[in-house]
Structures are given as C-alpha cells and as structure tokens.
Image (tube, rainbow, N blue to C red):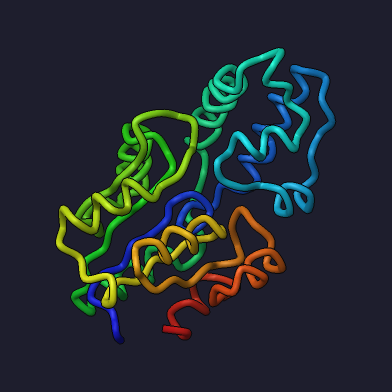
Amino acid sequence: MNYDSIIWDWNGTLLDDVQISIETINTVLAFRDLEQISKDRYLDIFTFPVQDYYAQLGFNFDREPFEIPAAHYIKHYNQAAEQSSLHQDASAILTYFQSLGCRQFVLSAMEQNQLDKMLSDHDLTQFFEAASGLNHHLATSKFENGQLLVQKYKLNPSKTLLIGDTIHDYEVAKLLGCSCILTAHGHQSHARLVKSGAPVVPDLKALQKAI
C-alpha cells in the first residue's frame, strides 16, 4: 500500500446514482419536448462541465439559460436521490482503507449542503476527515476545491490516490499530482475511461485487489 490518503469522488463512485440521473434528465428533456436519452448514450456523452453535456442533449442556451434546466434537474434529482443506494462493497472498502490508517476525503461536484446530507443519510461521515462540494448546483470543475483540500489538510500528492468514475476525476488527479484509479460502474463508459489512459477497474471489489 503506497498511499496514506484517499480522495473519493461521490456520485457514481461510491453512490450508485446512474439510473436516477438518467431518469431525472429524461424528465427535464420531456418537459422541453427534447429526445429522451438511453443509458448507453448517457455513458457515452456525460461530461464535465455538465453544461457541455446539456448542450449535446439539445438544450438551447440562447433560448433558455443553462441555470434554468440545471435547477429543474436538481429539484427532481434531490427527491429521487433520497431512495438511492451505495455501490456494492462501498462500505467494505471504506472500512478497509480505514483499517489501514488511511486518511479519507470526498471531493465532489455536488453542492456542499446536499453532499453533507447524503453522506449523513448513508451513515458514512465517520469515514471522512472532510468532504468538499461546490457552492452551487452547476457541477463545474472540482480542481480548485481539490487544490484547497490538498493545501488545507497538507496532503502529499505522491502519497495520495484519487478514486473516481469520470475522465474529469483523472484530469483533476493529474493537475493535483495525485495517482488515480477509475471505476467503470459510474457515469462514463468503460471504453471512454480506458481511452483516457487512466487505470480502470470494473468495480470497487476489483479496486481493492488492484491496490
């Protein structure tokens, strides 16, 4: 074990919310008479910043500012997310790293208050030294918050592993100087993740074996 600190992404990595996200965006699309999205297409086009993903779905920001459908999405997502569950083996691997004495953190594009609520609802707060979310619901980059996390908690990037489920997580890790492993059970397809050059595992059980 070469790491003393683990930075976790939340949505799609620990939280199994892909289907909820697809159903929610389809509600927002239907309200605007836009074409529904399948899971395969979702995994192929979801990206950060999320505004770029919305553009691929057909939203016209000249006619309707991005903040309006984004707020519509969050309203429905937060209601649906109350019924969400963790990925299989999420609690087990958090316990595993805790048993090794690793410091654990969350770095998420979710709004901070909602992130704190969900971690509490899933009884996970005891695993994390800190959880860093955004101060808005627009799901932009996590890089600046990642920098603040590393600086505030004096993390050694060479001893830190970032675990996520999107290419953006890999990009953030590279900018922070951290190692990275991506799980292919989240918001982007295995094929896309592999093309990024990041190490990819199918799920959290495989992650433990890979480390």
Residue 18, placed above or below residue 82: below
Q: Quadrant of residue 116?
A: top left
Residue 40, placed above or below residue 59: below
Q: Image point 61% across, 66% down: which residue?
A: 184
Quarter of the image that includes the C terminus: bottom left
Q: Image point 67% across, 70% down: which residue?
A: 195
Q: Quadrant of residue 104?
A: bottom left
Q: Image point 45% across, 29% down: which residue?
A: 137
Q: Is residue 134 left or right of residue 102?
A: right
On the image, the x and y values in percent for residue 5 come to: 25, 70
Quarter of the image that includes the N terminus: bottom left
On the image, the x and y values in percent for residue 44 come to: 73, 54
Q: Which residue is more in the foreground, 109 or 205? A: 109
Residue 11, placed above or below residue 136: below
On the image, the x and y values in percent for residue 210 come to: 47, 84
Q: Image point 78% across, 53% down: which residue?
A: 40
* Residue that sits furthest to the top in the current view: 63
Q: Which residue is more in the foreground, 127 or 50? A: 50
Q: Is residue 12 left or right of residue 24?
A: left
Q: Is residue 30 left or right of residue 104?
A: right
How many marks the image carries: the answer is 0
Q: Is residue 23 left or right of residue 130?
A: right
On the image, the x and y values in percent for residue 145 come to: 31, 46
